[in-house]
Amino acid sequence: MTKNIKIAVGLIYILCLCLILYGFFIFVDVTQLNDYKYIRDKTQFLIALKDQNSFWFSILFFLFTIIWILLLGFATPISLISGFLFGKFYGTLISVLGFTFGCTLLYILANQYFKDIILEKLSSKISKFKDMFNRNEFLYFMIFRFAGGGGTPFAIQNLLPVIFNMKIKNYFLSTLLGLFPMVFILSAIGEGIEKIIENNIDPSFINMIQNQEILFPILGFFVIIIFSFILRKIYFKK
């Protein structure tokens, strides 16, 4: 990768990040985030905006999710917001597809332009898993996704297959299937939070966990965590 291309990619990254932060601070007054009424009014505004044109709002959210992943963003907040705005089913569909396309694009770009850097920085740390992934890259990467990447940050998870030179089709499908369970649970929690705000319920800890639309997804979340821990112990021993 030439120096000029590296500089261009870096500038585009900084520009996109600055635009997102600028938009956030224009829309949100951070000094009011401890005011429940302020948060309720802002969320109701977003939901009303979505209801006015669901199709284009969904497309914009889907595209934002892809850009967010390309900027090495976390998956959890997007999953919660998606469930909050669209409900657990449609929210899961939008966010999982956005994550999958975003991760795949990031993988393609990283494999094309940053492979040497990734190999230098990460190859030695996971070399013991290379033979395992090469035996069945689709299965093991799907398990890796489902298990939360063995504790690996989401952005790093997206880049690790560069080391294994994973096929794009296998990367896409294993990401789609591996992320689905956790994204669904997080979207369900997001939907539950929206219901609490919609019904003007005091968002105290007790009220939150007594609400079945939040309690059951949280229990599911812990089940996934325990199952993921077991999978890490079986497949990704240190």
Image (cartoon, rainbow, N blue to C red):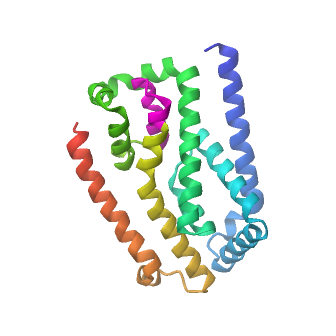
Name the quadrant of the N terminus. Answer: top right
Residue 86 included in the magenta stretch of the image:
no
Quadrant of res 17: top right
- The residue at the point 54 percent across, 63 percent down is 80
Viewer-proximal residue, 37 or 131? 131
Residue 156 included in the magenta stretch of the image:
yes
Spot the residue most to the top. 2
Quadrant of res 227: bottom left
Q: Position of residue 72 (x, y in %)?
A: 56, 40
Q: Position of residue 175 (x, y in %)?
A: 46, 43
Name the quadrant of the C terminus. Answer: top left
Question: Would you say the magenta stretch is mainly helix, strand or loop?
Answer: helix
Q: Position of residue 73 (x, y in %)?
A: 56, 45
- Looking at the rendering, the stretch of residues picked out in magenta corresponds to 154-171
Classify residue 7 as left or right of residue 91: right
Classify residue 133 as left or right of residue 159: left
Vertical order, 155 against 7 (above or below): below
Classify residue 92 as left or right of residue 153: right
